[in-house]
Amino acid sequence: MAAAVTTTTTATTTHLCRGLSSSAAAAKPWRATTLRCGAAARVEGLGRREALLGVLLSTATAASAPVAAVAATAELQEGFRTYEDEANKFSIAIPQDWLIGAGEVSGFKSVTAFYPDQVADSNVSVAITGIGPDFTSLKSFGDVDAFAETLVNGLDRSWKRPPGVAAKLINSRAANGFYYIEYTLQNPGEQRRHIVSAIGMAFNGWYNRLYTVTGQYIDEDGDVDKYRAQIEKCVQSFRFT
């Protein structure tokens, strides 16, 4: 995917979200940068089961991916800026000093991640999957409570012997055309991860797409209140453009 840089800035490549590659400007000082890339290729839409699997996979470990980012930044308010993806038609507010990485991951049309430079376990990602034309709204998957239970139950492996990851649903609600789901994940012997997700649907002229915005932070982290506030703001700020 070819990208044209309209405002240059020094970029470095680092690792993020356990595998994704990143191309991001140094956090300080920060200058507004706009990258544009071509429209995504047309692909077949997925069915209900495959789409739900995409939501499940968006919370799991991402595979290595080449950088192919779309990024547009602008001032939002003190401490935050707006990231706009012109190709995938969405925007999201992110902390001013967070880094950005994007790429192509097997099973997804696009994955974009946002994360602080020093905290590997706190981040927000936007994963996009295609779904079939018969899915016209989120209600095609059932109401938000049923969707949330299916999602979290699909992640839970605490019942196995030996037990695997424990998933616990905390809250679910529908608002502004999105399903918002809050839950925790904890592998045996590891710290508990708090997950906040927003799931929405949009049509790009070719096919319906399912967007899964996933923010996570460690419950026991010393700066838990700081990262909770940042991540919740990021997830709740997600909009289609």
Image: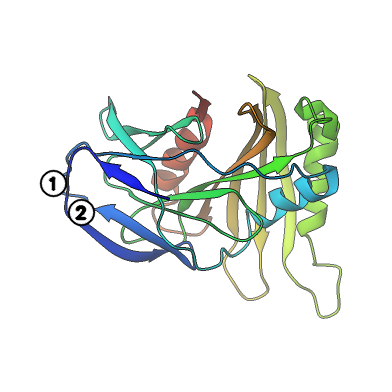
**Residue 38: quarter of image:** top left
Looking at the image, which residue is at 63% across and 26% down?
205
Nearest the eye: 32 or 235: 32
- Residue extending furthest toward the left: 29
Q: Residues within 10 Å of mark 2 (few under 14, many from 20)?
A: some
What amino acid type should be assigned to the residue bearing mark 1? Pro
Q: From the viewer's perspective, is 92 left or right of 161?
A: left
Which residue shows up at 48% across the image and 68% down it? 19
Report the colour scheme: rainbow
Q: Viewer-proximal residue, 210 or 8?
A: 8
Label 1 Cα neighbours within 10 Å, binned few <14 / some 14-19 / many ≥20: few
Secondary structure type for disc 1: loop
Q: For the residues marked 1 and 2, what is the alpha-carbon distance in whole angstroms? A: 7 Å
Q: Which residue is mark 2?
A: 26
Say which amino acid is labelled 2: Ala
Q: Position of residue 67 (x, y in %)?
A: 40, 58
Q: Looking at the rendering, which quadrant does residue 62 occupy?
A: bottom right
Q: Residue furthest bottom?
A: 162
Image position, residue 94 (x, y; %): 38, 38
Pointer 1 and pointer 2: residues touching (CB < 8 Å)?
yes
Q: Considering only vertical position in the picture, is 205 above or below 34?
A: above
Q: Position of residue 181 (x, y in %)?
A: 68, 39
> Going 43% across and 50% down the picture, which residue do you hit?
1
Circle 1 is placed at which residue position? 29
Q: Nearer the viewer, residue 152 or 226?
A: 152
Query: Toward which corner of the image does residue 200 lie, by quadrant?
Result: top right
Q: Secondary structure at mark 2?
A: loop
